[in-house]
Amino acid sequence: MIFGTDGVRDIPGTGLLTPDSIDRIGQAIVAHLTSEVAPGGSVLIARDTRVTGAEIESLLAGAIRRAGCTTIHAGVLPTPAVSLLLMDGVADLGLVISASHNPPEFNGIKIIDASGAKLAQDQEHSISETYAISEGKPESQQEFEVIEELGVQYLDKLLSSFPEGEFLAGLKVVLDCACGAACHWGPEAFRRAGADVTVVHGEPDGARINMGCGSMHPEFLGEEVKRTNSELGIAFDGDADRALFSDEFGRYVDGDDVIVIWARALLEQGLLDPAIVALTVMSNVGVEDCLRRQGIEVVRTEVGDRAVADALRRSGGTLGGEPSGHIIHHREAATGDGIRTGLAIARCVVEAGEPLSRLCDGITRFPQEQKTLRIQHRPPLDELQYLAEAMIEARSALGSGGRILVRYSGTEPLLRILVEAKKEADASFWIDRIEQSAVREASLGITASF
């Protein structure tokens, strides 16, 4: 299986992103397209600003064209833009060359089907099987024309789901564009909506994407909101499918808060029908309690936007997402869109006539601690003696008054640990206990903790 939580991801020049491997991925994608649609289909390709993106795009285009399909190139564009454009019938399949929120040394390939959704797991398995038996034949640099109008088409489509005109007139907003795909399209969307926009990290720079900026470092956003006396701040990640916020005091507002604010607004407008919200296992129990008190049913899913989208499709729900800021409004789009999320929460502030801090009222969270360990290997968790024993001990001690979650990252060589408890001291104690047990596991090859 070559796919992680969100597409194929690696460090270019190594592993899955050598020229030979990228060519094989391109061949496998065409085989999938031919079996799912028809021979000779079209593939829309976009990328974020990473310096390795152009070379990967050229290698993919060569493999796709050699196999008899055409390629359409949109240039630097957010991942959700490709989703909306596919829903508009621009192509039969979409590829986004991006490592999303990962550091600049990473890159990846996301695949989006004609409906605008991420591929199902059985489709990823099929592509992986074809990849395994393919032989790489990478070609020389490909030439292609970037169709700039596709970005404008995305923005028009996005804004058409909001009130006409300047519905954010006069609202002071700071946008942190993470030196990534949001650099042009985020500020343009908010200015067209009438907002007074301050942009930081707005230069498209693939060497600095996500570094000390954007949704991975929202502390910078809070300081800028206070400095400019703005009403809220919004931080995107590298491919702009996530958005995290700062309130008017510079305080952090995460995806859990966003879901509560947005769900309340939709419920009041009669647009949350059925009243169901999808949350992943990463969301705080206090958020679930808050939603249930308002008559909103909560469906829990595994980590990842695909799991959230699947839950919304099955339940008929409208809204779902993750604390990381990856939020899906299923009536409007098949994937999360950070710019859409930002516009929606800014609209909530304007229409409520209340600051963002007030819109977060009523959410009482359980104390939560998280640790991340950089690892070299991924042995099955149930085979790790010390870690398994610590997890059993923690679950027994916390009972129904808390929970723990230990998992491997789907996009980076990381082990993530989360502990939630009614008392902060209990959360701190058990996160340390579980971390120490993981460090004792030589088979993980831990190199750092943060």
Image: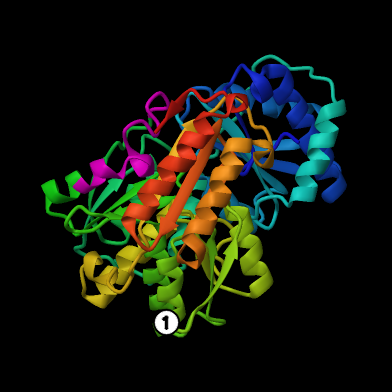
Q: Secondary structure at mark 1?
A: helix
Can residue 237 be seen here? The reply is no
Nearest the eye: 137 or 353: 353
Residue 213 among magenta residues: yes
Q: Quadrant of residue 289?
A: bottom left
Nearest the eye: 289 or 444: 444
Q: Residue at x 33, y 70 (%)?
A: 363
Position of residue 27 measured from the top left corner of the image (x, y, whole percent): 79, 30
Can residue 14 be seen here? The reply is yes
The type of colouring in the image is: rainbow
Q: Is residue 360 left or right of residue 295?
A: left
Q: Residue at x 70, y 25 (%)?
A: 22
Q: Is residue 313 left or right of residue 291?
A: right
Against 13, residue 259 (above or below) is below
Q: Residue at x 50, y 52 (%)?
A: 394
Position of residue 4 measured from the top left corner of the image (x, y, whole percent): 65, 39
Quadrant holding the C terminus: top left
Q: Which residues are magenta?
A: 205-222
Q: Residue at x 64, y 65 (%)?
A: 311
Residue that badge 1 annotates: 293
Against 41, residue 167 (above or below) is below
Residue 64 among magenta residues: no
Position of residue 248 measured from the top left corner of the image (x, y, whole percent): 18, 58
Q: Residues within 10 Å of mark 1 (few under 14, many from 20)?
A: few
Total numbered labels placed on residues in the image: 1
Position of residue 214 measured from the top left corner of the image (x, y, whole percent): 35, 41
Quadrant holding the N terminus: top right
Tag 1: residue type? Arg
Against 269, residue 443 (above or below) is above
Residue found at the very far top of the displayed protein:
140
Against 433, residue 317 (above or below) is below
